[in-house]
Image (tube, helix red, strand yellow):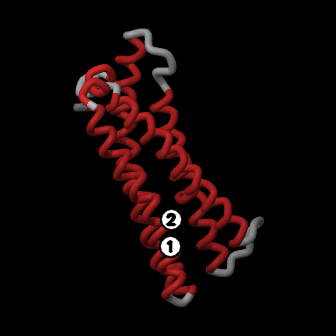
Amino acid sequence: MLLRVRGVLVALWLGLVVTLALVVAPTLFGQLDRVLAGQVAGAMFRIEAHAALGLAAALFLIERRLARSAALQGSPLPMTGLLLVLGALFCTVFGYFALQPMMEAIKAGTPGRWSFGMLHGLSSSFFALKGLLLLVLMWRCVSATASGPCARPVAATASRA
């Protein structure tokens, strides 16, 4: 049950990240003027960042419990899922909560050490890295579910074909 909940949470988070990056942002900037598109995209990325905090907290608790169980069974790399969640959380915290205020200050006219374009590129890189970390975590979830107690043995599957 815990593996399925983890899979659903990771799928929701990854789906949100992919939808924002590949559907929402390009559509906004393709249909609206740049300023309005930036405002709407900013609001949507704010929602994702706050949702990410909740999803990361829930996944952290699940991964910690799974890591503890795996370590007790002598499984190699029991902390990998936990590190992936923490990496995605770091990407959210740094990419949004640290860089976004700096970008807003530059837009408001406050001079900064870096340009808006540099900060936006860095923020986008962290968003892409978060997506990659979540993709790896999703891959692990699918692998864990496929090899779990509900999976049919390969020999039984091959004989039915």
Q: Spot the residue most to the right.
A: 113
Whether residue 76 is situated above or below residue 48 in the rendered picture: above
Asked whether disc 1 touches disc 2, contact meaning CB atoms under 8 Å apart, the reply is yes
Determine the residue positioned at 62% across, 80% down. Answer: 108
Secondary structure of residue under mark 2: helix
Whether residue 41 is situated above or below residue 14 in the rendered picture: below
Whether residue 102 is situated above or below residue 85 in the rendered picture: below
The crowding category of the residue bearing disc 2, from other C-alpha atoms within 10 Å (few below 14, some 14 to 19, many at least 20), is some
Q: Position of residue 131 (x, y in %)?
A: 51, 51
Q: Position of residue 157 (x, y in %)?
A: 28, 27
Q: Amino acid at mark 1?
A: Ala
Judged left or right of residue 58, residue 91 is right
Position of the C terminus by quadrant: top left
Labelled disc at residue 21: 2
Q: Position of residue 147 (x, y in %)?
A: 34, 25
Position of the N terminus by quadrant: top left
Determine the residue positioned at 37% across, 29% down. Answer: 144
